[in-house]
Amino acid sequence: MSSRIPGFYKLSVEERLKKVAEFAGLSDEEVKAVLSQGLPLDVADRMIENVIGTFELPLGIATNFLIDGKDYLIPMAIEEPSVVAAASNAARMARESGGFKTDYTGSLMIGQIQVTKLSNPQAARFEVLSHKEEIIEKANECDPMLVKLGGGCRDVEARVIDTIMGKMLIVHLIVDVLDAMGANAVNTMCESVAPFIERITGGKVYLRIISNLAKYRLARAKAVFDKDVIGGEEVVEGIMLAYAFAAADPFRCATHNKGIMNGISALMIATGNDFRAIEAGAHSYASIGGYKPLTTYEVDKKGNLVGTIEVPMAVGVIGGATKVNPLAKISLKILGVDTAEELARVAAALGLAQNFAALRALATEGIQRGHMELHARNLAIMAGAVGDEVDKVVEIMVRDRKIRLDYAKEILEKMRG
Ligand code: MEV
């Protein structure tokens, strides 16, 4: 089935859900779970401490995504208006030139072991590297299941760093965590090899913890935006100028990257992933060598815009809340993904779409119109408009730049004679 569903936004909540259920093959029970707001209190009570209730967000669906030749409806949990519409709109434009192509470097996470109180840190580094195989073996002993499935600790790195508390040896375990986000597996490995590392270095280990700068777990996406589809040469130039601005100015770059994360984090929340880890990874990766945009833009020979994104993507489809929160499970089913790799690829495409949409809006009419339209829609409905009346009332309010409830009522009264 195609994810291109014209007029999806005009349907009622129930009608939209019906379309999504058809697309994803949701059962009646799953449909009911989405409508009944998902997370049961007893499950919530087991997820964190001191629970007093649950907290909800709107769950929207971004349409039109064609990624590596496959159609996706992307669930997004977010409080901000226009984000879902913007992603869908960008995906519709990318579709015209074949959609998004993606790439993934594999599910390799980094665990850090901090070795202190070393009289000869370089000699300690030598000892760690020359005991690499033993360290890997010990790390893998604590997760036989991961190893059986084809994952596990793959490599060991060691660096001496200078700190205000003197020199330290930082050991990295490089672990293939397969379909998990990986924090549990990696932290357990770091803790279990720490005594051995103390023994061979003569130092004292303090921290043993995953790094969220997941630079070996990158997702990439690319899309061509046809200049005629996106509004012509001037729009292409506007987007190039917006990109140049972000690449040259950290104040702008923060907002540029924030817009990317609007999409990625909304998908992470919908699928029960640790969105703080993803945010930390994205911004720290963007800071390597000076804070830079996570996306790039170029103009090809035909004058079309070519966008790419490269971003760490420590996502999981097993463990954590992904399998505990019923809505997260349903989101994964709507997406139709069952590997971390595929989720990471989709997330990268979504981030690129979100960024392209923001830059296009900013370089042309600005983003307020979109926000205002949604606000106007709400007011039209509050004023009592139904069916086609809603669009007409919205159109007049936006045209007259008078987005107020009393004006919506006035237009509606006039329309109904
Ligand atoms: C708003 O949440 C996101 C934008 O500010 C992103 C951007 O400026 O690129 C629109």
Image (cartoon, rainbow, N blue to C red):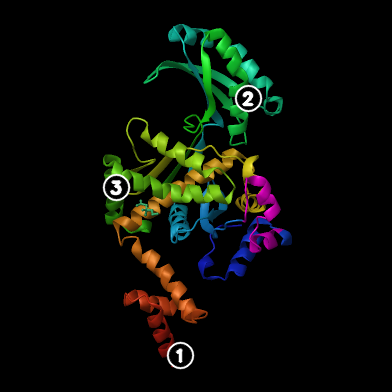
Q: Which mark is residue 63?
A: none
- On screen, 341 above or below 413? above
Question: In the image, which residues are magenta?
Answer: 30-53
Q: Position of residue 288 (x, y in %)?
A: 37, 31
Left-right relation of 247 to 135: left
Asked whether, in this view, residue 200 is left or right of residue 323, the answer is left
- The label number, if any, that marks residue 416 in the structure image: 1
- Type of amino acid under label 1: Arg
Q: Residues within 10 Å of mark 1 (few under 14, many from 20)?
A: few
Contact flag, marks 3 and 2 (Cβ < 8 Å): no
Q: Are marks 2 and 1 in contact (CB under 8 Å)?
A: no
Depth check: give the residue in front, 63 or 265.
265
Q: Which is more N-terminal, label 3 or label 1?
A: 3
Give the labeled residue for mark 2. 152
Label 2 CA crowd tier, 10 Å (few <14, some 14–19, many 20+): many
Q: Looking at the image, which residue is at 49% across and 77% down? A: 381
Task: Identify the residue position indicated by label 3 in the image.
Answer: 240
Q: Nearer the viewer, mark 3 or mark 2?
A: 2
Q: Quadrant of residue 107?
A: top right
Secondary structure category for the residue under label 2: strand
Give the distance between the C-alpha atoms of the residues marked 2 and 1, in whole angstroms. Answer: 68 Å
Residue situated in front as seen by the camera: 88 or 46? 46
How far apart are the two marked residues, 1 and 3, measured between alpha carbons? Answer: 47 Å
The answer to whether one can see residue 309 in this image is yes
Front residue (pair 118, 377) = 118
Please tell me which residue is depicted at 68% across the width and 25% down the height of the picture: 143
332 left or right of 381 in image: right
